Amino acid sequence: MTVDTQTPILEVRDLKMHFPVKEGVFMRTGKYNKAVDGVSFSIKPGETLGLVGESGCGKSTLGRCIARLYQPTSGEILFRGQDISRLSRKQLMPFRRDIQMIFQDPMESLNSRHTVGDIIEEPLLVQGVGNRAGRQRRVLELLDLVGLPARSVSRYPFEFSGGQRQRIGIARAIALNPGLIICDEPVSALDVSIQSQILNLLIDLQRELNLSYLFIAHDLAVVKHISDRIAIMYLGRIAEIGPGEAVYGTPNHPYTQSLISAIPVPDPHQRANRVVLSGDVPSPIDPPSGCSFHTRCPRATDICREQAPPLALHGAGVAQTTAACHHI
């Protein structure tokens, strides 16, 4: 079967996730936490989109909205051309097979009372795939795919190291042959020496199974290693998005420039050109008017305080990215 690599497997259009904030004696909704505030992007089959941002920028909330663990406030989530943002739990069941998630903490995301075999078999049971013997064979195949021995089936998560537990989580995620996997900081809880092993495993599985990834992380070096394109998120919105080489080599948005400049330089004799931002990240409950970055931006002018800049193409050729800034 020929895979269409041009038609996106996922399209997110103006997605918003506003959490009500209860206030006062009667716990009435006075304000909203605008965790995701109008995000749009797409992912093609077999592609990895890295999503980067500081803690609290809304990247994990965005991933959970796409997986429909949260019901978005508004916007569209088109998966293989169908809007799944308003589907009921029953209507979502067929899509659950095709959209899976790998979580940050493998110990928290695995049921400590279940054996590894039960954990990996669970999605097959929920979706009614095969009989018991067939599911058991599939579990052994999955363990082999992620580099764990067959004897792991009868053991419990606490008997494994952090990297091995994440391999179990990955096996569970690929059990139903999904098209899209949302990786929510899958290596941030692991030792640096183990991170590269898990990243290489994800890359190998992507090539073998034609997987698409939304790879969420705060470590720019990790994202650079695995991503085809990179989106930079700030206070619930996309600040810049483009090919990895362009975002790292010629970043256009001042926030991206600051993040890139903070990457440690391996040569101790080479002086880093740091772009240091002033102030703290504003609250998503009461975000700034206009451009949400203007309170920390060295280029900010009156128009930045009054008007939110649209995402627009900047640069040329391989250096082209899409960024939201009035002064590029």
Image: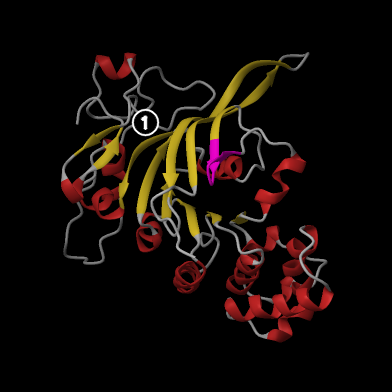
The secondary structure that dominates the magenta segment is strand
Q: Nearer the viewer, residue 120 or 274?
A: 120
The residue sitting at the front extreme is: 1
Q: Is residue 115 magenta?
A: no
Q: Nearer the viewer, residue 213 or 186?
A: 213
Q: Is residue 78 magenta?
A: yes
Q: Amino acid at mark 1?
A: Gly
Query: Could you say where residue 234 lies in the image, as x and y percent from the top left?
Result: 41, 36
Question: Residue 308's quadrant in the figure?
Answer: top left
Query: Could you say where residue 309 lies in the image, as x and y percent from the top left?
Result: 31, 24
User: Residue at point 62% right, 39% down?
Assistant: 84
Q: Which residue is mark 1?
A: 279
User: Residue at point 26% right, 15% down?
Assistant: 303
Query: Could you say where residue 62 lies in the image, as x and y percent from the top left?
Result: 54, 40
Question: Residue 183's quadrant in the figure?
Answer: bottom right
In this rendering, is residue 54 above or below 189? above
Which quadrant would the C terminus be assigned to in this image?
top left
In this rendering, is residue 265 above or below 157? above
Colour logic:
secondary structure
Please say whether residue 111 is visible from this viewpoint.
no
Q: Nearer the viewer, residue 78 or 315?
A: 78
Residue at disc 1, secondary structure: loop
Query: Could you say where residue 166 lies in the image, as x and y percent from the top left?
Result: 60, 67
User: Residue at point 54% right, 60% down?
Assistant: 186
Please say whether residue 117 is visible from this viewpoint.
yes
Q: Which residues are magenta?
A: 77-83
Name the side, left or right, on which 227 lies relative to 115.
Answer: left
User: Residue at point 30% right, 42% down?
Assistant: 256
